Image: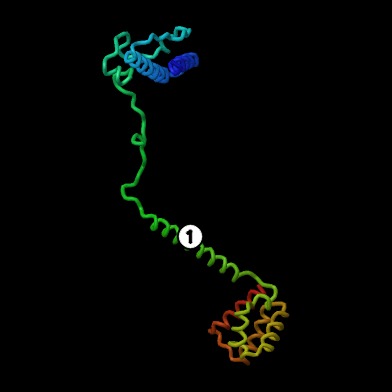
């Protein structure tokens, strides 16, 4: 009878705390099922009287009273077996009741990853091009430091006939000018004419571009 007393105390606590009628009904349902099991066990063993613990319960208002189906009528065989207090069992919500927006044709994961990867690569490529373009227009103070190792090798072998000393003297001279027209005049007279540079040569275009940045 320990469980019966526990359920009665629980029902009392829920009533005092003004719990929902649904919770009261569920506790009452469990209590009724427990009593029915006890009654069945007593009938099998010869019948033992059960004394219910005294519980003082204040009368609830009509709005708080849970509504029971077939109140005051003896329970049928079906109710005794099932233990339900209601003609219609309470529906317990499951995942079936949830509304999920599932696409009819799911997109393969590899296609999603491939699309995101392509978009990221395109974005990074655009950023690299933009940064490179800005660096190409940035003014430089020292022509010698602005020329990379690869460009120095290119200029030495393509424009200065492999003579590193001539390359160093020319860059130092160009670096010493104050304005671009002076450097341009000297390059035209001492380098392009004497060394036979052509204006459409890629190395010459790159060299001229670096000189312009030096005086921009």
Count up the numbered dots. 1
Position of residue 69 measured from the top left corner of the image (x, y, whole percent) = 31, 14
Task: Give the quadrant of residue 7.
Answer: top left
Q: Looking at the image, which is closer to me, 194 or 20?
A: 20
**Residue that lies at the very extreme toward the left in this rendered image:** 77
Colouring rule applied to residues: rainbow
Q: Residue at x 42, y 13 (%)?
A: 64
The secondary structure type at the circle numbered 1 is helix
Residue lying furthest front: 46
Residue 68's place in the image compared with 119, above or below, is above
Q: Residue at x 29, y 17 (%)?
A: 79
Position of 39 with respect to 76 (left or right) is: right
Q: Residue at the spot x=72%, y=77% of the render? A: 178
Which one is nearer the viewer's eye here, 13 or 184? 13
Q: At x 59% / y 91%, what residue is drawn?
A: 196
> Left or right: where does residue 201 sit relative to residue 184?
left
Residue placed most toward the observer, 168 or 69: 69
Neighbours of disc 1 within 10 Å: few (<14), some (14-19), many (20+): few
Q: Do we see residue 57 in this rendering?
A: no
Placement of the C terminus among the 4 image quadrants: bottom right
Residue 2: where, in percent of width, then height?
46, 17
Q: Position of residue 41 (x, y in %)?
A: 35, 16
Q: Nearer the viewer, residue 96 or 179?
A: 96
In percent of width and height, residue 103 lies at 34, 47
Quadrant the N terminus occupies: top left
Please state if 197 lies on the left or on the right of 54 as rendered. right
Label 1 belongs to which residue?
Answer: 120
Q: Is residue 80 visible?
A: yes
């Amino acid at each position: 009878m320990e469980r019966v007393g526990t359920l009665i105390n629980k029902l009392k606590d829920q009533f005092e705390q003004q719990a929902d009628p649904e919770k009261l009904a569920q506790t009452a349902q469990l209590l009724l099922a427990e009593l029915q099991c006890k009654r069945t066990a007593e009938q099998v063993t010869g019948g033992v009287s059960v004394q219910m613990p005294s519980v003082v319960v204040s009368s609830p208002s009509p709005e708080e009273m849970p509504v029971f189906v077939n109140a005051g009528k003896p329970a049928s065989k079906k109710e005794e077996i099932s233990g339900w207090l209601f003609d219609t069992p309470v529906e317990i919500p499951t995942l079936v009741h949830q509304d999920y927006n599932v696409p009819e044709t799911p997109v393969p994961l590899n296609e999603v990853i491939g699309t995101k990867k392509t978009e990221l690569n395109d974005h990074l490529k655009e950023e690299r091009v933009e940064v490179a373009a800005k660096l190409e227009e940035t003014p430089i103070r020292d022509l010698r430091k602005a020329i990379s190792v690869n460009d120095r090798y290119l200029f030495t072998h393509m424009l200065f006939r492999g003579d590193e000393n001539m390359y160093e003297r020319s860059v130092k001279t160009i670096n010493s000018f104050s304005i671009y027209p002076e450097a341009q005049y000297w390059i035209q007279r001492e380098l392009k004419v004497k060394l036979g540079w052509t204006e459409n040569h890629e190395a010459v275009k790159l060299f001229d571009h670096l000189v312009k940045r030096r005086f921009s």
